[in-house]
Amino acid sequence: MSEVNVKKGLDGVVVDETSISKVMPDINSLVYRGYPVQDLAENCNFEEVAYVLWNGELPNKSQLAEFSKKERSLRGISKNLTQVIQSFNKECHPMDSIRTAVSYLGTEDSNHWDNDGDEKMNRAINLLAKIPTMIAADFRTKKGQDIIAPDPHLSFSENFFKMCFGEVPAKEVVKAFDVSLILYAEHSFNASTFTTRVITSTMSDMYSAVVGGIGALKGPLHGGANEQVMHMMKEIDDPDKAESWMLQALKDKRKVMGFGHRVYKNGDSRVPTMKKYAQKMADVTGQQKWMLMYDRLEKVMVEQKNIHPNLDFPAGPAYYMMGFEIDFFTPVFVMARITGWAAHIIEQANNNRLIRPLSAYTGHGERKVKALADR
Ligand code: COA
């Protein structure tokens, strides 16, 4: 076989075009539909960002009101789905719960093969509206608490807090959460988004693609990193131990979660905004130790390896300070990334070609099958 240039991990490979978002690592920038993500985070709510990702333009007041009304009206889930969630093993990871719940939701949509433009958009907004309800139902069931129904009078983020904790927290907390959803919403051809595009390229349905996306996001090299960051910080516990912990981890050649990125090599464009809001959570809750630890871990990693934090590094402690259980951090990421996934699923379906790469075979040369008696 002639020499083949294998692009392991598809590193550096451009596989398609997209008009949804652009990551510009050289200038540390990320734009959704042309808007810098930092501007969106400071000036918009998550609903406006979902709208711009799906429609290409920011909504005006009446468009936003209509979109929001629809999202609020779709938040409820069926009794059967609620019972499915309540039947999950209490020990199962909430990413397994949401993966299974989305799959079940697909079985309730008898129309799921219908893929005309309106149907795809309706399905996307239905998933956006119901995923938080399913996550919150699992959150409370795992704690042995009664499920709280969604409240259509509350914003997307306020409603999620109410469904999880029974009340809406201070507006600084809601804003920090909303910012995290905006920053997590979309990131071009990352592993989970690419998974949704591969599944869509076979002309499968949106639920199957989203279930695949959730599976990919669960891994600690992708979305699961936000949980691992907090486990690490809790293991270190004391900011004064952060430096020696990091030096030892690097000596042991450990992969330190929340650092490094396939695309950004000089820092993640989303980190300064998320760090600012994580700091606000430390100010609101008085839990400064996580941010002290943050700075010390970052300093050693940058000095020793020139590897910078990614979005999961500030998001982990921010969610912890908001009161979420650690294993719900990645499901929260799902709540946000459903917007990016759906945008990519629709874009892929509208201009589809089956995604089917090649491989370089390194196995045995061709040989004859011996009869069972001769082996
Ligand atoms: N901790 C320690 N070393 C790291 C590192 C980390 N988090 N991330 C990268 N490196 C080192 C690797 O050990 C490797 O060093 P080497 O060349 O001496 O072997 C080098 O940097 C390149 O890393 P590699 O894993 O090949 O880069 P990648 O582009 O394939 O991986 C990630 C990118 C995100 C998978 C990787 O940085 C990682 O595993 N990070 C931790 C998980 C995480 O936070 N994921 C969320 C991403 S948003």
Image (cartoon, rainbow, N blue to C red):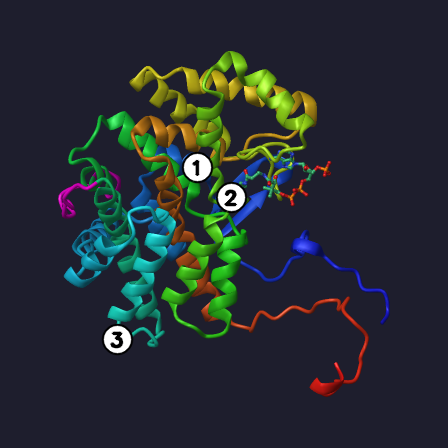
Crowd tier of the residue under label 3, counting other residues whose Cα lies within 10 Å: few below 14, some 14–19, many 20 or above = few
Image: magenta residue range: 144-158
Rendered image: mark on residue 141: none
Q: Secondary structure at mark 3?
A: loop
Crowd tier of the residue under label 2, counting other residues whose Cα lies within 10 Å: few below 14, some 14–19, many 20 or above = some
Q: Are marks 2 and 1 in contact (CB under 8 Å)?
A: yes
Q: For the residues carrying marks 3 and 1, which lies nearer the camera in this image?
A: 1
Quadrant location, the C terminus:
bottom right
Confirm or reject: label 1 Cβ below 8 Å from ligand 1: no
Residue 76 in the image: state x and y as whole percent: 17, 55
Residue 344 seen anywhere in this rendered image of the structure: yes
Residue 19 seen anywhere in this rendered image of the structure: no
The amino acid sitting under disc 1 is: Glu
Q: Residue furthest top?
A: 240
The amino acid sitting under disc 3 is: Ser
Confirm or reject: label 2 Cβ below 8 Å from ligand 1: yes
Q: Quadrant of residue 1?
A: bottom right
Q: Which residue is mark 2?
A: 220
Q: Which residue is mark 3?
A: 110
Q: Quadrant of ligand 1?
A: top right
